[in-house]
Image (spheres, grey):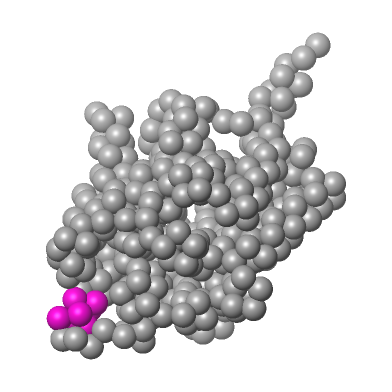
Amino acid sequence: MERKHAYNQYRWYMSGQGFYFFAGGIGFVLKQWLIAFYLHETPQVLGLAQMVMSLPQLVFILIGGLAADRLELRTHLVRLQVLAAVSMSLLCIFLLSGALSVWAVVSVGVLDAIIAAFAQPARDSLLNRVTQGLEKRTLQQTVTIANMLQFGAQILGMMLFNLVRIVGPVPIIVIQAGLALSAAYSTTKLDPSPPEHKGESSVGAFIRDIRDGLKESFSSPLIRPVMIWLSSFGFISMGVYMVVLPLMVRDIYHGGALEFSLIHVGFFGGVTITSYFLSKVGHFRYQGRMLLLAQTGTISSLLILALNPEFHVFIAAIFLWGVAGALSMSMTRSIVQQNALSTHRARILSVYQLVMFGGSPVGAALAGYLVRGYGIHNVLVMSVSTSAFFLISFALFSRLWQMQTHVTRMLEETEASSGP
């Protein structure tokens, strides 16, 4: 009976995961499309808009992690998902009133980013608790399955977005809000999840708790290399993805909504398919080596993009990027979740989100200005060169090559202790 209940909890969690990121996939494409295609703004405006919409998540993510450690997670997440539905509906008001502008899109994007800053650490922390009652599944497998569902649902959202050419943006946004409410309903089916960390309510206590989360993230010999890795590559990848790719579709391939959505379907398709195969693997012995391999795939895809290939090759290169991204995300997130203290888990996961997306604002703004000054091709060449430099540096001077999973270390310790 307990095992059946545990699996029911797991299914409701994954159901909410799917609904939430189905809505997120629509929103991810929608805001970029509204700015670049509906309003037809310049590269600088697109880059700055992406920067402004990214910043709030970075500013609030550590507070979001602290809130997730201190609050009852189920109720907290339900409220956030309902609020997300309200935020999505605001774009309908702007569109129907004829008041849509870059500032209107950015304002909604800022609100969405704040909500995400609180929702993501809560959702990630809740996954650990849902997984505890399962048999025959490692945390790395459930993390990979969650990633697969997340990006698969986002693909569905991006494919659904193609209907914008037929029905316009308003009905699409209504569907998006309905999906967010469905995610909230699924979350209500979970058991209450009381906080494992209870701290004082003073400002000083909040600051100390956030500082403790940062300290634990960068003092752990297993988590610290992952944080440095993400901060090194994040601003390059995010800048290219958020600004350069939409501009390539518009200015080089002269595409519209269909072609624009295909770049996201290609990337997240690579992520989803790779995550499916990764979910069949219990664990990798050397996660750090898999990270180095994944980054090699990312650099290869960027190099292909720099050659301005035919559009079908362009999409194939983005698919390869998604394959590498799935491998990288699975390894980094597994390392962090496996080695984070339960009392600090949400805060450490919020730091993980911070360093993963911390380069987004700078990368987006920088990419917009570099494209204007040097052109798309040269910006891609710069990205390849910089990424290759970082990759070689990590391979030679970091501990990633020797890093093992906690499962492998436990097996080796058991074998050593039982040896002759």
Please identify the quarter of the rendering in which residue 370 is found.
Answer: bottom right
Tally of numbered tags: 0
Please identify the quarter of the rendering in which residue 335 is found.
Answer: top right
Percent position of residue 384, x then y: 69, 56
- Locate the N terminus by quadrant: top left
- Locate the C terminus by quadrant: top right
- Residue 404 vs 57, above or below: the answer is above
The boundaries of the magenta stretch are: 90-96
Outermost residue on the top side: it is 420
Percent position of residue 250, x then y: 43, 66
Q: Is residue 181 visible?
A: no
In this picture, residue 230 sits left or right of residue 109: right
Say which residue appears at 76% left-offset and 21% top-offset. Answer: 416
In this picture, residue 129 sits left or right of residue 189: right
Say which residue appears at 21% left-offset and 83% top-offset. Answer: 94
- Residue 40 vs 78, above or below: the answer is below
- Residue 330 vs 7, above or below: the answer is below
Percent position of residue 53, x then y: 44, 76
Is 92 colored magenta in this rendering? yes
Percent position of residue 379, x then y: 65, 66
